[in-house]
Amino acid sequence: MLDLINRDRQAAGLRPLVASIPLRTVARDHGRELFARGILSHQARDGRSPRERFDRAGIPFRFAGENVAYAEDVRTAHPG
């Protein structure tokens, strides 16, 4: 997904994004939870928002958000 996003960013004249292991960990944990619950949501089971999950993991940010998608693969999810 990061490669697809960075291709679009480059085409738009934007700097590439860089992978973050702590952010990837938070995202994968949330994805596993959603899969286990059979839902698609920005809210964790305990009600935490993306920003709260990032704060809890000690991930600094000025702006925060997340994209969640139910798709067979990243190429299908990326245009959404």
Image (spheres, rainbow, N blue to C red):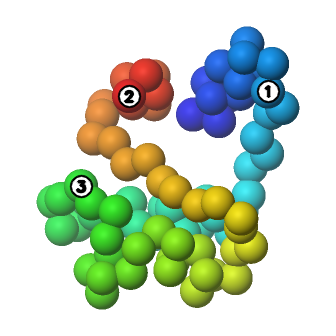
Q: Nearer the viewer, mark 1 or mark 3?
A: 1
Q: Are marks 1 and 3 in contact (CB under 8 Å)?
A: no
Considering the image in quadrants, where does the N terminus appear?
top right
Residue 30, position in %: x, y?
41, 67
Looking at the image, which residue is at 27% across and 41% down?
70
Between residue 18 and residue 63, name the one nearer to us.
63
Q: Is residue 54 above or below residue 46?
A: above
Q: Residue at x 72, y 17 (%)?
A: 12
Name of the residue lying farthest toward the left: 38
Indicate the amino acid at tag 3: Leu
Rounded to the nearest angstrom, the CA distance separating label 3 from label 2 is: 14 Å
**Residue 49 or residue 38, whichever sits in front:** 49
The quarter holding residue 64 reads bottom right
Which circle, 2 or 1, is nearer the viewer? 1
Q: Is residue 32 left or right of residue 13?
A: left
**Sequence order check: which comes first, mark 3 or mark 2?**
3
- The crowd level at tag 2 (other Cα within 10 Å; few <14, some 14-19, many 20+) is few
Q: Is residue 34 left or right of residue 18?
A: left
Residue 2, placed above or below residue 61: above
Q: Which of the image's four quarters has the C terminus? A: top left
Q: Is residue 57 left or right of residue 49?
A: right
Residue named by callout 3: 40
Disc on res. 80: 2
Mark 1 is surrounded, within 10 Å at the Cα level, by few (under 14), some (14 to 19) or many (20 or more) other residues, namely few
x%, y% of residue 68? 37, 48
Q: Secondary structure at mark 2?
A: loop
Residue 16 in the image: above or below residue 24? above
Residue visible at 65% across and 36% down in the picture: 2
Q: CA distance from mark 1 to mark 3?
A: 29 Å
Q: Quadrant of residue 10?
A: top right
The residue to which callout 1 is attached is 14
As drawn, the residue found furthest toward the top would be: 11
